[in-house]
Each structure stands twice: as structure tokens, then as C-alpha cells.
Image (spheres, rainbow, N blue to C red):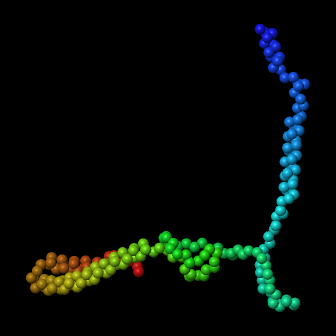
Amino acid sequence: MTTNLKDELASLRIDKSARGSGGRGALIAVVLLLVAVAGGLFYWARREPVVEIRTAEAAVRSGAAGAPNAVLNASGYVTARRRATVSSKVTGKVMEIFVEEGKAVRQGQVLARLDDSQLRAMLNVDEAQLNAAKRATTENEARLREAELTLGRRQQLVKEKVISRAELDSAEAEVESLKARIATRPGLACFRL
């Protein structure tokens, strides 16, 4: 059995003389590398050169000796000196735009119109509350006039000892209360139109 195993192992051995030359794979690798280098050199030699752009400022010169009305023709591009960001103090849906991007605008020019329906509704509510507060103030002023008349009558009645001092104190308190209410004008302090 050992001889049989030795024969089998010997049959698996690679014969070095039958392998051929080992330099064939290396030769293919060298050729591929040379082709890649040659392609890179060819691409680099054929690329377009980088063009440097120079900028210049245009200036008006007084008439030259030979050409008093010379015209300068040039081609190029213009860039803005200043750039501005435009924003609104309130948020809303843009309904109309009155300018195009890149166009010159002047101070105070309307650039766009926002949807103001919600703001108008809020303004209407505030105006209604203001009117209600004004009506309440007018009512309080009328009640104050009435309370002052009542106070005057009660002062006279106390002098005549017809009513008690407590009723006079109640009338004085009513007058002071109405004066304080009118002075603070509840509801009017928060409205500014």
C-alpha cells in the first residue's frame, strides 16, 4: 500500500521542464504598463492649455491726439459689485413678482406682492375690538357723569341728615372707580393704528 501511495504522490508532482517559460506573464504585464503610460502621455500632450482671464476696469479718457471720439469694443462678462439679499418682515405666500433675477432695482421699488388676506382679517378683528373699547369708554364716561350727579345729591342729603354716611361713601367709591376705569382705558392701550 505504501508503494501505491508513493506512486500516486509522484504522479501529482509538476514537471518543471513541461511548465514552459515563466516570463510570459511578466511580459504581458510590462506590455500593458507601457500601453497605459503611452496613453497617458498622449492624453497629456493633446489637452487644451489653461487660459488665464485678466480683468480690467473701463475708464473714460480725454480725447487722444489721433482719435477724439474713439469707441472701445470689447467682449467679456459683467459681474455685480454688490449683491443683496431680499426678505420680508412677515411671512406669506408670494402672489406676484415684479422684477426678474439680475435686473437692477432702485430703493423703494416694489419687488413682489404677498398674500395679505390673513393680515387683513387680523386687522379687521383688531379694529372691531378697538371700536368696542371706544364704545365702552364712552359708556363709562356717561356712567361717571351720572355717578357724579348722584354723589352731589347724596352729599346734600347727608348734610340734611336724610341718609347715612355709608350711602355717601358708596357714591364716592363709584365715582372713583369709574374715573380709574376711564384713566386706564382697558383695551385701548394694546391698539396702535
At which x and y percent is residue 9? Answer: 80, 16
Nearest the viewer among 40 and 189 is: 40
Q: Give the quadrant of residue 132.
A: bottom left
Question: Which residue is found at the position 79% from the left and 70% from the top?
Answer: 53
Question: Which residue is found at the position 68% from the left and 75% from the top?
Answer: 80
Question: Which residue is found at the position 25% from the left and 81% from the top?
Answer: 139
Left or right relative to 16: residue 156:
left
Left or right relative to 186: residue 70:
right
Left or right relative to 93: residue 63:
right
At which x and y percent is residue 21? Answer: 90, 31
Left or right relative to 190: residue 143:
left
Instruction: Pick the quarter of the image with the N terminus.
Output: top right
Q: Is residue 66 visible?
A: yes
Nearest the viewer among 48 and 61 is: 48
The residue sitting at the left extreme is 162
At which x and y percent is residue 67? Answer: 85, 89
At which x and y percent is residue 38? Answer: 87, 50
Nearest the viewer among 139 and 18 is: 18
Instruction: Please determine whether, in this image, residue 37 is positioned above or below residue 184.
Output: above
Q: Is residue 180 visible?
A: no
Nearest the viewer among 173 and 127 is: 127
Instruction: Pick the quarter of the image with the C terminus.
Output: bottom left
Question: Which residue is found at the position 81% from the left and 20% from the top?
Answer: 12
Q: Give the quadrant of residue 145.
A: bottom left
